[in-house]
Amino acid sequence: MQNRESGKTAQPRPRVFRALGKADPPEQVEIEGHPYRRVDILKHDSWAATALYQGPRGTVVAKFNRQQSVFGLPMKWLGRRLAQRETRILQELVDLPNVPDYSGNLAINGINQLHAVTHDYVPGHPLERREPVNDDFFSTLQQLIKDMHARDLAYVDLSKRQNIIVGDDDKPYLIDFQISLSLPGWWPGNGWPLRTVLRLLQDMDDYHVLKHYRDCRPDLLSPEQLDLERNRPWTIRLGRRIGKPLREMRRRFLVFIGVRTGKGRAQSETAPEDAVRREMK
């Protein structure tokens, strides 16, 4: 992709920075034994490759987690673990109306793909910056987060507004539970250390919802709610001090190896993810 700032052209990601290496998501798969064909690739980064498939159930999102090794270090175990956890979370939240339904087991030529997870496609678009959503949008989203927290689950990745889908029905939906934290009731290690971490992450969830609320519908919030500095957890402050330099370092590295250009923004990649492409239009 040609970058307007530098005039340079970014290079495709090397396979070590692609979840499936040189491969793309397969063109044909089976979900619960039924054939599906690929219609679009939404994203392919270091962690996962995500694609849309069409079949008897309608449109389905399939995420293929990390398979490519890292300098000889096997990573297939991580891909299987991430898929297993996200599948379990989708199944646990099946009764919540603002979470897409689990679509079923994915196979290729009859062989189960343990690194893959599927869910029904939600017609809509990622939440845009300062999008004037309807009056009930964020109260519905807050209730969804509250219901998830009540089940000993933290979403964790709410800082990324692209994970919030504005459905064609104008309701909020959450996708991508790859890094969410869930404490299964059967796990014997659910003591105070893990529960303390869970509560801290849940506080961060609440803060990020409030931040998006303020950016999109500040007219519905009180002066106290609008004061983000007052509502910001210490974990957010710490995370920014650590995360901001790391993100900048990562951007510079991606520019150095030619994957990105200019200031290292995701828009400069040859194949940015679907949410980024939408914002570029």
Image: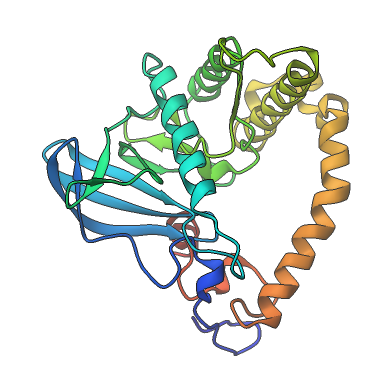
In x, y percent, where is residue 195? Answer: 74, 16
Q: Is residue 85 above or below residue 195?
A: below
Say left or right for 26 vs 75. Answer: left
In the rendered view, would you say 57 is above or below 136? below
Can you give x and y, in whole percent of width and height, for residue 163 in the image? 51, 40
Q: Residue furthest bottom?
A: 7
Q: How is the image coloured?
A: rainbow
The quadrant in which residue 225 appears is top right
**Camera-side residue: 127 or 252?**
252
Residue 76 visible in the shown view: yes
Q: Position of residue 206 (x, y in %)?
A: 68, 23
Task: Count the numbered circles shown.
Answer: 0
In percent of the image, x 75 and y 12: which residue is there?
191
**What percent of the width, then of the height, locates residue 274?**
42, 57
The answer to whether one can see residue 127 in this image is no
Which corner quadrant of the image does residue 114 belong to?
top left
Left-right relation of 243 to 214: right
Residue drawn 63% across and 30% down? 213
Q: Is residue 60 above or below residue 49?
A: above
Q: Nearer the viewer, residue 48 or 121?
A: 48
The quadrant the C terminus occupies is bottom left
